[in-house]
Each structure stands twice: as C-alpha cells, then as structure tokens.
Amino acid sequence: MDHKLFPIEGLVEFQPRVFRDERGYFLETFSLKWFEPLGIKPVFVQDNQSVSAKGVLRGLHFQKPPHAQGKLVRVSSGRALDIAVDLRRNSPTFGQHGSCVLDADKHNLFYIPEGFAHGFMALEDNTTFLYKCTDFYAPETEGGILWNDSALGIDWGIAEPLVSPKDEVLPLLQDFSSPF
C-alpha cells in the first residue's frame, strides 16, 4: 500500500496493492495498519453507498461536533472528483480544498478527517461511491457550504452539474461560523 499526503494536513490518498491473476483480483479496501504510521486512529462506525449518474454533484457536506465525521471514501464503479474543504477555523489552510479523482480501476481511497466539508461529482454514469464514517448520521448536526462558492476556487470541470435543491441553497464560506 502506498499513500500520498496533501498540503492540507490530514488529507491522505491511499493506493492499496491489487493482487491479480487469471481468476480476477483481490485487494484490501481498509486496514488500520495504513493509518498507524501516520498517527491516525480512526474508528469507523457506519458505511454508506450512493450511485450517481455522470454530472451529479453531491455536497459540500459535513456534520458539526459532537457528531463530526471523518470519512474514508472510494468508488467501486466509475470515477468521481472528490473534494475536501478545510473548515478548521485555526488551520493555516482554512477555506482551502484538496481534490482527488477516485477511480474504480485504480482502487484508490481518500481519507478526510473531521473538520472538513466533503463533496464529489460523478465523472461517469453509474458511479458507485462508498464511504466509511467515524460517527453516525445525525441530521441535527448536518451542515454544508455552497458547492460553487467562488471563494473556494473549486474547478468541478462542469458548468452546470445536477445538484439537489438542498445543496443549491447552502451558505457561502464567508457566512459560515466554524464549530471545528
């Protein structure tokens, strides 16, 4: 397993080893051993899955304390542009984002710790997005930032993605009071 650290502290892309033969392939999609050398000790309590058509954008979402979530994300089919925005008020990278193209053929994974807004856009039809969370879904603590806030400078690669009505009315970063 290889990993890539990002300039924004806490974001990590993992590239697991894939063992292939004439029968197909095998890989580990999670191991705590990946995190130990990085000093990260996630405890995942919930797995989620979504399927999206090409051009669907979901996010940018987060949960506030006491139910903030770290996430380990991947796709099992298709490809997705995955975005994590640093919402940690005292972080030197507050408001900056990291991006990772998740690809079912690469089998890569992206770790996003607590204190980040998260979103993704499906780059292919039938993109199956899987994510492990460090806390349970708690609707009373959910929040978000507007996906196309110009202050974030995110290039989603598409002018008019398919976005839910709920995600179209999220606040701008400048109107956000960080609980992290």
Image: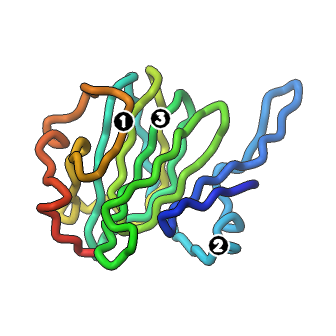
Instruction: Tell me the number on the disc at residue 126.
Output: none
Of the 4 image quadrants, the one containing the C terminus is bottom left
Sequence-wise, the earlier of marks 3 and 2 is: 2
How many residues crowd mark 1 within 10 Å: few (<14), some (14–19), many (20+)? some
Is mark 3 in CB contact (under 8 Å) with mark 2?
Answer: no
Of the 4 image quadrants, the one containing the N terminus is bottom right
Q: Provide the secondary structure element on which disc 3 rests.
A: strand
Looking at the image, which residue sits at the far right? 22
Asked whether, in this view, residue 113 is left or right of residue 77, the answer is left
Name the residue beneath numbered marker 2: 38
Residue 2 location in percent, x, y? 73, 55
The amino acid on which the numbered mark 2 sits, given as a three-letter code, is Leu
Residue 76 position by quadrant: top right
Residue at left 21%, top 47%?
Answer: 149
Name the residue beneath numbered marker 3: 80
The amino acid on which the numbered mark 1 sits, given as a three-letter code, is Trp
Residue 49 position by quadrant: top left
Is mark 1 in CB contact (under 8 Å) with mark 3?
Answer: no
Nearest the camera: 123 or 46? Answer: 123
Instruction: Tell me the number on the disc at residue 156.
Output: 1
